[in-house]
Image: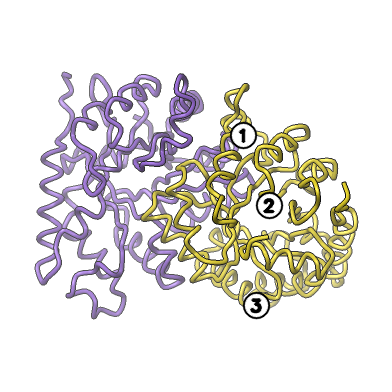
Chain colours: A purple, B yellow
Amino acid sequence: MSGCWEGIAEASRRNNSRICVGLDVDPSRLPEPVKSETDPIFSFNCAVIDATLDLVCCYKPNIAFYEALGLAGLEALYRTIQYIGHRVPVILDAKRGDIGNTALQYARAAFDRLGADAVTVNPYLGLDSIAPFMNFAGKGIFVLCLTSNESAKDFQLYPDEAPLCERVAARVAEWDRGHGCLGLVVGATHAGKIGRLRRVAGGLPFLLPGIGAQGGSLDEVKEAEVPGGGLGVIVNASRSIIFAGEGKNFADKVRAAAEDLRKRVGVQDSTN
Amino acid sequence: MSGCWEGIAEASRRNNSRICVGLDVDPSRLPEPVKSETDPIFSFNCAVIDATLDLVCCYKPNIAFYEALGLAGLEALYRTIQYIGHRVPVILDAKRGDIGNTALQYARAAFDRLGADAVTVNPYLGLDSIAPFMNFAGKGIFVLCLTSNESAKDFQLYPDEAPLCERVAARVAEWDRGHGCLGLVVGATHAGKIGRLRRVAGGLPFLLPGIGAQGGSLDEVKEAEVPGGGLGVIVNASRSIIFAGEGKNFADKVRAAAEDLRKRVGVQDSTN
């Protein structure tokens, strides 16, 4: 286990959890009690964090939801990450990808400015778009591999006989040698394909979105595990957890939903 | 010419220009005179805009450079786009890509919040990651196809016999039918490959970065043109123009560099 992943692994052991809660706040779905707060987004996130801090191995805010709210939204994101305060790690879901000189700016934004512990990136531009992130000591980088959406097939599964997602998995595994800071995003909606990606990727950590609102199941989690055990899989759920409750006791419902997913996902049986 | 591109085409005719200036501000390279301003980034951008407004067909700020400066940086970006005030169109270079629900948030950020006229997006997640941008009337979307960096070859040129970038060009041309709002980003550093992408992509507008600091040449611009004329190519240069001068008269140097590139690129001979 490289230092880049130790924070998540430690939280995973402490909380007996492989789940990540996605802090993807849609203002139109906020529960009534937080709507009257000065900063409803931040208040909502605090309530979700307070309700789940001992149930998760990390949080994953998707920056798009904050950008859509303008500068006030981004300020709420800054405050949210400060509020978590490294009690568990934060993966900034940003899916950035640009040429090296520019990728460095994105890395600075994620790690130096926002204080994230890990980030998601897009592989389309190749190694020199990812390398600037790898130069930040102790930070984890999840590279998009096979995403959870329907249109993943447009390019990621092409060509049939040697799909792009497998090439990404193979190259990322290769680039990770001597670094130990790379992982893959593999949507939990691709039964049958995940096991193959696991064989290509060796022991890289997989971040699995798609459980919950998008319909992925626990069979896909099994398929993603690293034979022999260890932190191989982090299961993310966003909407199905954070919007589990609406009224006065919404935070209890959030906790119950997180607790339920934590139990269902479990931890890996290290003898499998 | 679809309504989505009419703003750029109109500025191109008015200013007799196919050049786009990239507002990619690196604080360490700011000229002395703006360093003492209250908001040096904004002041610098205003000086560059004042010096080039009648020489360009659009501006292209890359949001990474502003994100790297935290909320103050993003505020400078907001103010810069307001300062341009639709006198010429703004392409927000953001290279976003996420699943539909999230892509919609990025589109809101770019178009509703920042007020950009066009945006760059990453194709890795396929059509449903691009469609939310296409639903904003009158906005242009440049999809990354073949980027200007060395590592473009890792995935975009794979497999040899039917490279990903050509598949992206073909699918984007197909998705654009009935819309007229899509274009492609094609780096000007790939002599010999651009002409092939032009044949696959039909008449889609090409945004060509890589001229200037990255070493692309005017031969590649020729290769990217649409036979028969029209707005086929927009040539972007960033560092080689905005950092052309250092001292008191830096804005004159910026203007001279933009004027030089505008002349060299010219407009397309519609009889070729």
Say left or right for A45 vs A92: left
Residue A190, position as x, y percentages in the image: 30, 32
Measured as percent of width and height from the top left, residue B259 is found at 88, 63
Kindly identify the amino acid type of the residue bearing the numbered disc 1. Answer: Glu
Q: In the displayed structure, would residue A71 be above or below residue A245?
A: below
Labelled pair 2, 3 in contact (Cβ < 8 Å): no
Q: Chain of mark 3?
A: B
From the viewer's perspective, tell me whether residue B41 is left or right of residue B264.
Answer: left
- Label 2 and label 3: CA atoms lie apart by 23 Å
Q: Is residue A152 above or below residue B52?
A: above
Residue name at image x 49 percent, y 71 percent? B113
* Callout 3 amino acid: Gly
Q: In front: B85, or B62?
A: B85
Residue neighbourhood size for the residue with mark 3, other residues' Cα within 10 Å, grouped as few (<14), some (14–19), many (≥20) = few
Q: Are marks 2 and 1 on the same chain?
A: yes
Letter of the chain that mark 1 sits on in the rendering: B
First-in-chain label (1 vs 3):
3
Query: In the rendered image, which quarter contains the N terminus of chain A?
Result: top left
Q: Which residue is mark 2?
A: B205
Q: Write down the residue under mark 3.
A: B85
Q: Residues within 10 Å of mark 2 (few under 14, many from 20)?
A: many
Residues tagged by mark 2 and mark 3 found on one chain of the structure: yes
Mark 2 or mark 1: which comes first in sequence? Answer: 1
- To which residue does mark 1 refer? B166
Picture residue at 56% right of the left edge, 50% below the top:
B177
Residue drawn at the location 26% of the way across and 70% of the way down:
A43
Closest to the observer, A84 or A195: A195
Secondary structure of residue under mark 1:
helix
